[in-house]
Image (cartoon, helix red, strand yellow):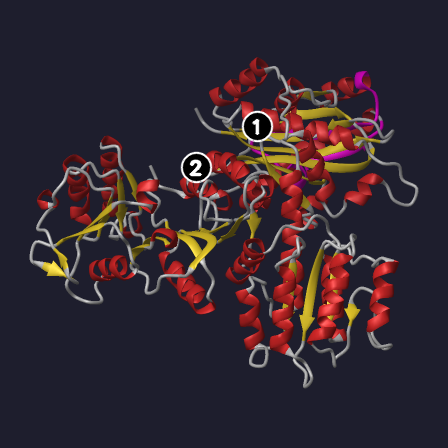
Amino acid sequence: MLNKFFSPKSVVVIGASREPGKVGHEILKNLILGGYQGQIYPINPKAKSILGKLTYKSIDDIPGDEIDLAIIVIPAKYVNEAMIHCGQKKKVRAVIIISAGFKESGKEGAQLERELVASAQENGMRMLGPNCLGLINTFDNLNASFSTEMPPKGNIAFFSQSGALGTAILDWAVGQRIGFSKFISLGNKADITENDMLEALCFDPNSKVILGYLEGVEKGEEFLHKARQVTKVKPVIITKSGSTTAGTRAASSHTGSLTGSDVAFEAAFKQTGIIRAKSIEELFNHALAFAYQPLPKGPHLAIITNAGGPGILAADAAEKSNLNLLFLSKETTDKLTNFLPPAASVYNPIDILGDARAHRYQQTLEAVLEDPKVHAVLIILTPQAMTEIRQTAEIIGEISMTSEKPILTSFMGEYAVKDGIERLAKYQIPNYSYPEHAVESFRTMYNYQNWQNQPALTLVPYIGKKDQVREVIDQARQIENLNIGDIRARRILQAYGFEVPSSDVAETSRMATAIAEEMGYPVVLKIDSPDILHKSDVGGVRIGLKNGEDVQNAFHEVLSKARKFMPKAIINGVSVQKMYSGEREVILGMARDPQFGPLLMFGLGGIYVEVLKDVSFRIAPICQDEARAMVMEIKSYPLLKGVRGQRSVDIEAIVDALLRLSQLSIDFPEILEIDINPLIMDGTGQGAIAVDSRFTITPI
């Protein structure tokens, strides 16, 4: 269906204008000047011809029964009628709605947009927009947009949720002579979304790399599914602005409070192989590397430079990016020694000195590329009096034509190196103003190569006791308690195989002592109240109680403090719990993101999660490898593995707990938030115990 958008045989422009500067005029002009070879039908009831094209009063006057693509540029209140007329009279199945005044303008506009969607569905039409810039397909000479320029042909496809940003990028691309295959402005995404574009561009033979600018996604689960498929075929690089609504609600859990505006998107991109660009500059830095050069087969980068300082900067950037500045083979260093001056450095970075002319660059590059240990080369050039900039660029370009290894350059400066950079572009050699940016693009290419080579992830579902969880949730809803803690929370965890401490609720100090005696000391006392989620904040927790007297004193103290700080709280009693001690504590959590679903969290437990915020995130469901990556990703992972004689905690027990939490989150979408804090790692190095937990659920 989307082929009608990109390669139509006929186009009707509803709202074509005679006045230059009006959108309806510019779109028609772009179609003509872009070289589109299909039939163009302008619609304007007051004109006989526009820009040499015969103009029709209505779509009914156009000869023939079918038109492939309609572009609508009329006031919002008339758009729906025009679209229905197109679908019923001329069997139009692809519509671009340029017109604004829909959901971006308020309540009335949102209603108009809903009517558009309904009409499109009823008439079997697909719709791009409304409130969009249009689209461009350079390979069919189709400029169905009101951009000022038609970019040159290339293998980069770009879709954007922002039309204004799209026009700026198109203008920049024309100025930089960067080729595009397709450009798509998504607008309000009432029908066609980024998910449709990912699928269409995945199978587009003219697009080698897919770029996108997003402010949000419409269908999170579908996005995850399609993105995983597409990134296995070609790289997808996206820059994301805006935020989800997850951070705007009052979060009651640690996980909820830590899920900032971008956490879910960061996790989504990581799990689907999408490359996230932190800026538009980085977006195109990476795009040119992927579009112009082959993927590296390994992490070994060789640096050739005519200046020591920039070479060191590049080496530092490589080390920080976990790339390998390998030792060149002896055969290579011997070759370099034979022709380089004695003062040159034949090690990596290879400093060929400031007086290096084009021939010295050529000999060095050829020798380095022949080294089987080298996977990519970065060439740095600073303009000096004897530097042959143009000739060096030509030599690098010629060598790149026969190399299977990626070659990146950093011709530093502006005025003096301009001609050299233009010649590099002719050979499709990406150039970076600073060597650190080139290193970052190489690291991104290497990481993407690893992603492509990863085997498909296998999900192993856990079978929980769903009836037991359902019973706890139903009971909580009946008493209108949407916060579940203590004993009822432990019942949920037990239903999914978590080990939890034995505990019971006491209504009197005597009962608390009896429970403790039977349980065995030491014990922990906690206030049991659905209204008090963070018990330690109100003095509602006492630990390490070793005898009956301690228990009785703690019982009265916990109750009095809870009543003092939260006098309106419902108090069921005091929970007596067997105390467990372990060398280290971690936290597991889940907060349900409105776009992607259950967002899992892992980090150090106790108060450290609030202070250090050293946490990792993934979107459920996750597999074993993803759970293990969550554990290894936090900066404090070495503490879990053991330092200074400490034994390692049971990492696999944490992985298992994350997988069970993932399954629980999937099975019960009515659970909004989960905190398991702390999950105490057994001091023997085997197993883990979920000491404290709480859940937040939706109302009925």
Task: State yes or no: discs 2 and 1 in contact (Cβ < 8 Å).
Answer: no
Q: Is residue 195 visible?
A: yes
Numbered badge on residue 219:
2
Q: 258 or 597, which is in the foreground?
A: 597
Quadrant where the image shows the C terminus: top left
Q: Residues within 10 Å of mark 1 (few under 14, many from 20)?
A: many
Left or right: where does residue 7 sit relative to residue 85? right
**Relative to the observer, which residue lies in front, 509 or 76?**
76
Q: Tag 1 or tag 2, which sits nearer the N-term?
A: 2
Name the side, left or right, on which 589 lies relative to 11.
Answer: right
Residue type, label 2: Lys
Tell me where the magenta segment starts and ends, as one range: 518-546
Q: Which mark is residue 665?
A: 1
Q: Is residue 619 magenta?
A: no
Q: Check the image and report above or below for 595 versus 623.
A: below
On the picture, is 74 further left or further right than 264?
Answer: left
In the structure shown, which secondary structural element does the residue marked by tag 2 occupy? loop
Q: Position of residue 641 (x, y in %)?
A: 83, 39
Q: From the viewer's perspective, is residue 331 above or below residue 233?
A: below
